[in-house]
Amino acid sequence: MKYPYQMMQLPYAFDALEPVIDAKTMDIHYNKHYKGYLDKFNKVFEHMTDYHDKSFEELLCNLDSLPVIAHDGIRDFGGGVYNHELFWNVMSPKKQKPSEYFLKKIDMNFGSLMSFNEEFNKEANHIFGSGWAWLCTDKTGKLALMGTKNQNSPLEEGLYPILCIDVWEHAYYLKYQNRRAEFVADFWRIINWEYVEKRYQNYIK
């Protein structure tokens, strides 16, 4: 990736995730919110020419090494881009289930798929205000759940995100209004497990 950063192309049509996520929400989320983060990031980052060859992961993992004046912009706007691009990729209109390999990893870390679902849902629903719930891994392959506020990333905590759900209201409010728990429950119907597992395996190699 090189500056100026470009919008990621969605791997599906705006209406492909219906009825879980409606086409209008996807259109607004992608063309307004996500694009807004990217445009603001490019503006903040314009004069940081020494870092224009860096990826979002490199920037977010190494915030302390960057000029302090740019920390908030990179975290808020760069994080907004990175988080959304992961979110677009971990969803799919193709119904999927975790592989036997990944189910064993889930069982090892959470006891069962049902326990994992319950803990993930709890993390997502208990975030006050805007934020994200994440399934992450460390280099050893150990899985962990966490929530972050605003556009903060697990990368800042030394963890690598492999699955996420956006619980900012713009992600679900047109269809679900104040029923975040319903949106979180429906999210399991559109998870791209193939992508999640590939991301996991690539990181722990």
Image (cartoon, rainbow, N blue to C red):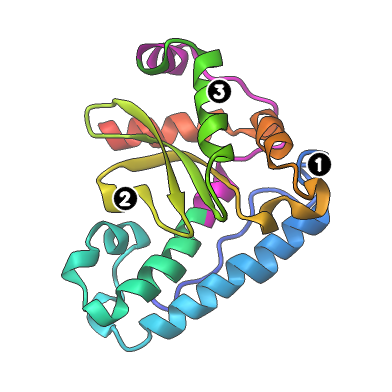
Cβ–Cβ under 8 Å for marks 3 and 2: no
Q: State whether residue 192 is above or below residue 111.
A: below
Q: Earlier in the sequence, mark 3 or mark 2?
A: 3
Q: Earlier in the sequence, mark 3 or mark 1?
A: 1
- The nearer-to-camera label among 3 and 1 is 3
* Residue ID for mark 2: 155
Q: Which residues are magenta?
A: 84-108
| Main secondary structure found in the magenta portion | helix
Kindly state the secondary structure of the residue where label 2 is placed. Answer: helix
Q: Nearer the viewer, residue 83 or 127?
A: 127
* Residue ID for mark 3: 117
* Numbered tag placed on residue 18 in the rendering: 1
The residue type indicated by label 3 comes to Asn
Residue 2 visible, this orientation: no
Q: State whether residue 1 is above or below residue 101.
A: below
Tell me which corner region of the image, top left, top right, bottom left or bottom right, holds residue 84: bottom right
Q: Nearer the viewer, residue 123 or 31?
A: 123
